[in-house]
Amino acid sequence: MSDTYGQTALDTFPRLLMQHAKLRPNRPAMREKAYGIWQTYTWSQVAENVRAIACGLAEMGFKRGDRLAIIGDNRPRLYWSVAACQCLGGIPVMLYQDAVAQEMAYVLQDAEIRFAVVEDQEQVDKMLEIQPEVPLLEHVIYDDPRGMRHYTQTMLMGLDELCEMGRIHDRNQSDFLDGEIEKGASDDISVMLYTSGTTGKPKGVCQTHGAFIAAARGGVQFDKLGDQEDILSYLPMAWVGDHLFSFAQAMVAGFTINCPESGETVMNDLREIGPTYYFAPPRVFENLLTQVMIRMEDAGPTKRAIFHHFMEVARRCGADILDGKPVSAVDRLQYALGNLLVYGPLKNVLGMSRIRVAYTAGAAIGPDLFRFYRSIGVNLKQLYGQTETCAYVCLQPDGEIKLDSVGKPAPFVEVKLADNGEILVKGPMLLKAYYKRPDATAESINADGYFMTGDAGFFDEDGHLKIIDRAKDVGKLTDGSMFAPNYIENKLKFFQHVKEAVTFGNGRDFVTAFINIDLEAVGNWAERKGMAYAGYADLASQSAVYDLIREGVEKVNADLAADPKMSGSQIKRFLILHKELDADDGELTRTRKVRRNFVAERYQVLIDGMYAGNKSQFIETQVKYEDGRTGKVSADLRIEDAKTFAPLAAKRAA
């Protein structure tokens, strides 16, 4: 790797880890909340544990180039297993912990996995269920021994036992592991992450140590991150964003990773840790704000009045104060008072009091949501990237935040646009290959060495990149108007009452939409209005809910009418689905992206009904319950019309 930092030797993650163990042996590298108490592990303890796991794996026959599956919630020992695997020149392959056994079987077969380190009994059971389909799988090592007493399968072993074996191995051959780390090179594959499979079978993206270290160093330098940062690691380890923020950047900067007790305790743990550096997809920021707003609606009139008054002040000048722009003395004074009474306590409740830098990515974030966090003093920014680019393409520089852009090309990254508007990127963070898919690798990188992202976008006058949609999803209506489904869906999802939206229109005369309401937000709204309902389907079918959603659809139409490129793709008809789109039913990927073609096929009868001008349409759908049973739900769905606006009348309507 190029010697930009005078640190050519630190070009693999194991070397970075051992360097931290030398330089900052007693600084906290990781914390984990277990049984309500935070346990802290220093860098020297982490290095020691990684040695034990690596030597234990070697003792069991793990070889350079072998793949190690890692499945579970964010746990220190699972992160250590990633590093241990890398020490031996192996390739860690993280799987989504909430994936069903069958989805895991595909990845285990594709990656030819012999060894798996899993979190607990639940994941062990999945491995045993699919064992006949993955004959290469020889060893399953589990972290948490609870519930494992009566399991007698010879392929199973506790991580404690593996570590013990490793310590003995290390004592007997004390120079073995250092020798293995020495063999590592910057161009070795450091991790394999599977794509979400929105367009077909997931592909294994092979990223090198050099690629992830370049992305991590670029981000650390860009946001001036140091070894004093605290980050909460709660997003799936199989997701590229977690690997960049919680593993690669921590290994580069030497800051502390904090693992929550469980998915249910994340909010409490966030408050206790008070991270300085935070990442969440828009959905998390949205849910937090929805909870705040619901609580405010239930507060007394005085409290509500104070909140709304100071939120108005924040909207007016908060973002400017954050960006260091000039603000009048009166507004500054008002804002300081607001900070004392509202913003400070609010950030405290959200666990955001100490945040210096917060990022969101993975989907578009609503301008109102973005503005809200920045106005109360949270330095929230957007980034853009893919699994194939180590989640590192564009970042928003401090003081240059635009609500509708993903920022400027990040350090070391080159971004340009193809003739059809597709975003092309080049830099040290590009994938080495798709595993066993030379065809797909060749298709994704053009003759000039640019990765073809598949996203369509454009640069504004200040050099900020704006994303419109997936290039392949951008279509045309019969009158030639541009149709960008994802762009329209994101605008719909910016309303707190809409959880999911799917739009149709390519090759059609007009645009239609499926809506999933947000049960919590709409449920609270219904309760305040004294409306009775018996679950999702009942609530979704009520006239008042249709009126509420129509209001949102028409606001989106007014917004689209004001955009010369998009004014022709306003939504003419919509319906509210009788069930929530679900990953278990194949309608969403595990990262909650809509599988558009699958949804279109599954609900073809509804689409036909909307375009035929029907007032309602009957549908019966097969669903999968959490306990594995299948059943059918049927409903007669109302189809409603929405008002559209003439392009020139847009400003008035909005």
Image (spheres, rainbow, N blue to C red):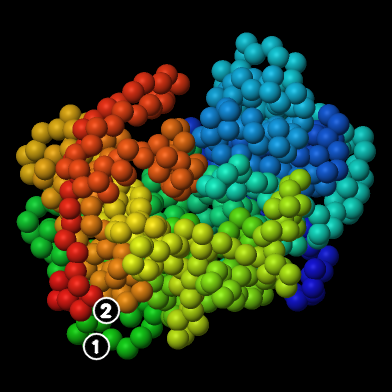
Please tell me which residue lies in front, 238 or 257. Answer: 238
Q: CA distance from mark 2 to mark 1?
A: 9 Å
Res. 129 image quadrant: top right
* Viewer can see residue 88: no
| Image spot of residue 429 (x, y percent) | 68, 64
| Image spot of residue 483 (x, y percent) | 38, 63
Residue at 23% x, 57% y is 572
Please tell me which residue lies in front, 652 or 150. Answer: 652
Q: Quadrant of the C terminus?
A: bottom left
Relative to 273, say whether 618 is above or below: above
Report whether 479 appears left or right of 225. left
Residue at 71% x, 14% y is 153
Q: Quadrant of the N terminus?
A: bottom right
| Residue that badge 2 annotates | 317
| Residue that badge 1 annotates | 328
**Pointer 1 local density, CA inside 10 Å: few below 14, some 14–19, many at least 20:** few
**Pointer 2 local density, CA inside 10 Å: few below 14, some 14–19, many at least 20:** many
| Image spot of residue 40 (x, y percent) | 58, 45
Relative to 535, say whether 589 is above or below: below
Residue at 55% x, 69% y is 422
Please tell me which residue lies in front, 257 or 1. Answer: 1
